[in-house]
Amino acid sequence: MAEPMVPFEEIPHTADWALRAYGRTLPELFANAARGMYSLLLDLEALGEEEEREVMVEAASLEGLLVAWLNELIYLTERERLAFKRFEIRELIPPDPGDPEPNGRLRAAAFGGRAEALRKYIKAVTYHNVAIQHQDGRYMVELVFDV
């Protein structure tokens, strides 16, 4: 029987926060990356799910799509003082590298509640060393957050 997969883990970083996220599928990877990001900010168990926001982003690369998705969530946290703990990836279309104007698309729902007190604020997700890898039947990515 296969061992259960850890969805994400915090990893050491000299100046900012960093996270490694995993998923058996790309949608699971994107959801686990978002959940991991919010686990750095607050206690997810104490957060309700009374708020839902629809998020749509486009990008020219798969990594760009992931960064745009997480940065859009950060924007919602700053603008509406919301944090999220559950994510439904409703559509994830990776960009076609053969297309002269590749455009990947993500449509998702984020569920959460009011973020009264955050441990820190994340300014942005960086592109530093972002590379989605697929091996041994799972996806993995390392993310660095500018705080």
Image: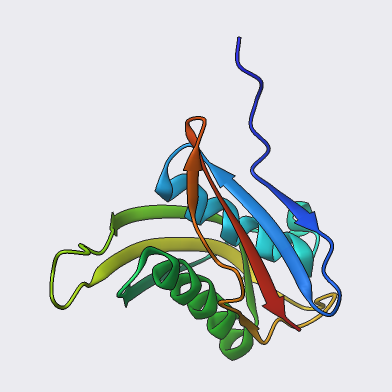
Asked if residue 49 can be seen in this view, the reply is no
The quarter of the picture where residue 123 lies is: bottom right
Of all residues, the one furthest to the top in this rendering is 1
Above or below, comparing residue 2 to residue 57 in the picture = above
Please give left or right for residue 30 compared with residue 5 in the image.
left
Of all residues, the one furthest to the bottom in this rendering is 79
Please give left or right for residue 142 compared with residue 98 in the image.
right
Q: Residue at x 32, y 54 (%)?
A: 90
Q: Position of residue 64 (x, y in %)?
A: 42, 73
Please give left or right for residue 101 compared with residue 77 in the image.
left
Comparing 62 with 43, the one in front is 62
Comparing 137 with 79, the one in front is 137
Q: Position of residue 9 (x, y in %)?
A: 74, 50
| Quadrant in which the C terminus is drawn | bottom right
Above or below, comparing residue 66 to residue 101 in the picture = above
Q: Residue at x 61, y 9 (%)?
A: 1
Protein image colouring: rainbow
The quarter of the picture where residue 7 lies is: top right
The quarter of the picture where residue 62 lies is: bottom left
Comparing 55 with 28, the one in front is 28
Q: Residue at x 39, y 69 (%)?
A: 65
Q: Position of residue 130 (x, y in %)?
A: 55, 67
